[in-house]
Image (cartoon, rainbow, N blue to C red):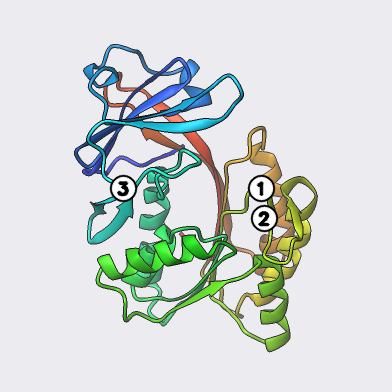
């Protein structure tokens, strides 16, 4: 299990009965969390003094209830600064548990002794993009959502990385990968956060269960002769470690050797001293 323990501006304060209580900077938020039935308590005072709460009605429609809550504000992780704020789908524009991956990526890039080219697919608002750029890598950031890419650009600006070598691409990730193969482009590292289900800009339907292995077979064609790392983050309910491990072994390890580790990501729960699982990460690296 990889736990993101080094946050100052974010805290998972408590979780209980299908909700999580969080501190984002100075703001206390309550959001739905299916895993919160097994962890945490309901005794933290923030359950009463919250600034924002995402509620779901009987028709499964969600909305934010707010008290003194801005549209967006900034939080930092080390030298990185991110804009966060409530979105219509309950997200905040950042997944704090990914901080443990940012540190892993930065360490490998900083120790590589050469210029590293990173491809970040399904890159959302660019947490990994910003982390890799801050470590000195050039990054190609790809996401099908124009709004997410604009948000990522703002995060780069806030982190004083607006002039870093980052390519910002709004496109269907699969189609982009196919074009990059035809162009003969190569990358030393790949990061991807594929969804369970989605539509690309061309209307193509993505299903993780049927498309993941096929997609990996194409993505590995973009790896350079000396790849540094390959990271897959999955939040799909029911996905097992073995699924990620077998796919990385067949599509990365088979060709490049190296090491593979599949771990549960987690966040510490301040009020109870326990932790909450937050998806899976599969990491391939030439060396650790």
Residue extending farthest bottom: 183
Above or below for 55 versus 139: above
Whether the residues at callouts 1 and 3 have beta carbons within 8 Å, the answer is no
* Residue at the spot 26% in from the left edge and 65% down from the top edge: 158
Q: How many marks?
A: 3
Above or below for 35 versus 101: above
Considering depth in this image, is 247 or 161 the residue closer to the camera? 161
Residue hosting label 1: 245
* Residue at the spot 48% in from the left edge and 61% down from the top edge: 147
Which label is found at residue 248?
2
* Residue at the spot 62% in from the left edge and 75% down from the top edge: 223
Q: Sequence order check: which comes first, mark 1 or mark 3?
A: 3
User: Is residue 287 among the parts visible in the rendering?
Assistant: no
Across and down, in percent, residue 179 comes to 70, 80
Residue hosting label 3: 71
Across and down, in percent, residue 185 comes to 62, 84
Which label is found at residue 254?
none
Considering depth in this image, is 238 or 19 the residue closer to the camera? 19
**In terms of secondary structure, where does tag 2 sit?**
helix
Kindly indicate the quadrant of the structure image that contains residue 45. top left
Kindly indicate the quadrant of the structure image that contains residue 25. top left
Whether the residues at callouts 2 and 1 have beta carbons within 8 Å, the answer is yes
Q: Residues within 10 Å of mark 3 (few under 14, many from 20)?
A: few
């Amino acid at each position: 299990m990889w736990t993101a323990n080094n946050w100052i501006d974010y805290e998972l304060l408590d979780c209980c009965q299908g909700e999580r209580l969080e501190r984002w900077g100075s703001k206390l938020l309550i959001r739905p969390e299916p895993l919160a039935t097994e962890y945490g308590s309901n005794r933290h005072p923030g359950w009463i003094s919250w600034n924002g709460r995402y509620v779901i009605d009987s028709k499964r429609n969600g909305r934010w209830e707010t008290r003194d809550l801005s549209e967006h504000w900034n939080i930092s992780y080390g030298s990185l600064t991110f804009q966060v704020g409530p979105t219509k789908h309950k997200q905040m524009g950042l997944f704090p548990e990914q901080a443990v991956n940012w540190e892993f990526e930065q360490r490998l890039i900083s120790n590589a002794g050469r210029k590293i080219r990173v491809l970040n697919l399904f890159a959302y608002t660019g947490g990994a993009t910003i982390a890799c750029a801050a470590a000195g890598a050039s990054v190609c950031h790809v996401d099908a959502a124009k709004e997410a890419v604009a948000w990522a650009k703002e995060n780069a600006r806030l982190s004083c990385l607006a002039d870093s070598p980052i390519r910002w691409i709004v496109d269907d990730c699969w189609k982009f990968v196919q074009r990059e193969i035809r162009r003969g482009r190569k990358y030393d590292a790949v990061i991807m956060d594929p969804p369970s289900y989605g539509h690309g800009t061309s209307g193509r339907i993505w299903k993780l269960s049927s498309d993941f292995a096929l997609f990996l077979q194409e993505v590995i064609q973009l790896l350079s002769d000396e790849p540094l790392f390959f990271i897959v983050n999955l939040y799909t309910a029911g996905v097992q470690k073995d699924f990620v491990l077998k796919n990385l072994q067949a599509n990365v390890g088979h060709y490049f050797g190296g090491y593979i580790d599949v771990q549960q990501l987690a966040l510490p729960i301040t009020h109870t001293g326990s932790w909450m699982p937050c998806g899976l990460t599969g990491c391939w690296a030439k060396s650790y």
